[in-house]
Image: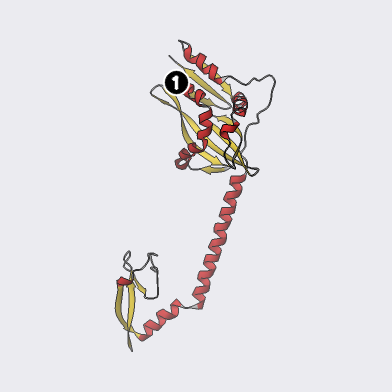
Amino acid sequence: MIATMLTVVCSECRRENEIERIYCHDCGARLERKAIKKNVAPQEDTHSRVKRLFDARSAKMRAMFFKISKVVLGAFGVAALTVMALPPELPTVAKNPLVQAPTVGFDLERVLARHEPTQVKYTDEQTNLFLSYNLKSKKKNLDKPFLEFIRAVASFHEGTASVTMERAIFGYSVYTTIDFAPQSNGGKAGLKPTGGRIGRMPIHPTIAKYMNYLFLDLWDVLERERKLAARLTSVEVHDKNVLLVSIP
């Protein structure tokens, strides 16, 4: 027995799909009704196609697949949020009476004013004491609605300088970190973003360069020191210290 069967031809991959389908069986593209094609097929073939569409076993397998996919995606989401909520390992800002908070701005002005090669070195402990004392009086400029500024911490590893900001949302701390590598451009010192983290979750370098926007308010309150540092000749980052060099 011969029957006329209508099919919908996918405009993307040219697959002929059953008239009941909304999306292509092969590529998933949305099917257009104007692409309906009339085929003449045996009645038995039509029945088998309809049977496959409404086969209970296939429907159960598809439902099981989507359930498992949701569970796996949910597990990945929970794991990512957990890693993002974990605080990173940060150097402690010890209030050592033998270590004074450096006056970075005055130090850089003095270095740049000299007419001979000069360098100044800061340890991560000195840098964090400077940040702690300097930012305490500027906290109002760093607080945002529902986002309280807690602290900023710097850490130095060979070839990489990292800055972490801790903010609080409804009492829960959120940590964002950006990594920099020193670079020289036309005889002037600079830092290039190379990576970052939210909590302990690493951020790809391609995305990390946009994380600078999360630190704009911090860079604004440190504008004087940043402008002076930009006039230096080079910056060398070593383990637990940074070396600033000026060559007239």
The residue carrying pointer 1 sits among few (fewer than 14), some (14 to 19) or many (20 or more) residues within 10 Å by Cα, namely some
Which residue is at 40% across, 83% downward?
A: 47
Figure label count = 1
Quadrant of res 5:
bottom left
User: In the rendered image of this protein, does residue 219 appear above or below residue 84?
Assistant: above
141 above or below 39? Answer: above
Q: Judge whether residue 133 can be spotted in this image.
A: yes
In screen coordinates, is 53 left or right of 176?
A: left
Image coordinates for residue 210, horizontal then vertical, percent: 46, 39
Q: What residue appears at the point 59 percent right and 46 percent down from the top-left corner?
A: 83
Can residue 160 be seen in the rendering of this structure?
no
Q: What residue would you read off at disc 1?
A: 231
Where residue 163 sits: x, y (%)?
55, 33
Q: Secondary structure under badge 1?
A: loop
Most distant residue in the bottom direction: 1
Residue at the spot x=59%, y=32% of the render? 140
Q: Where does the N terminus fall, quadrant-wise?
A: bottom left
Residue type beneath disc 1: Arg
Relative to 198, say whether 13 is above or below: below
Q: Is residue 148 left or right of residue 237?
A: right
Q: Position of residue 111 (x, y in %)?
A: 50, 15
Residue 218 image point, x, y percent:
54, 32
Quadrant for the C terminus in the image: top left
The quadrant in which residue 135 appears is: top right
Q: On screen, 148 above or below 114?
A: below
Give the image's coloring scheme.
secondary structure
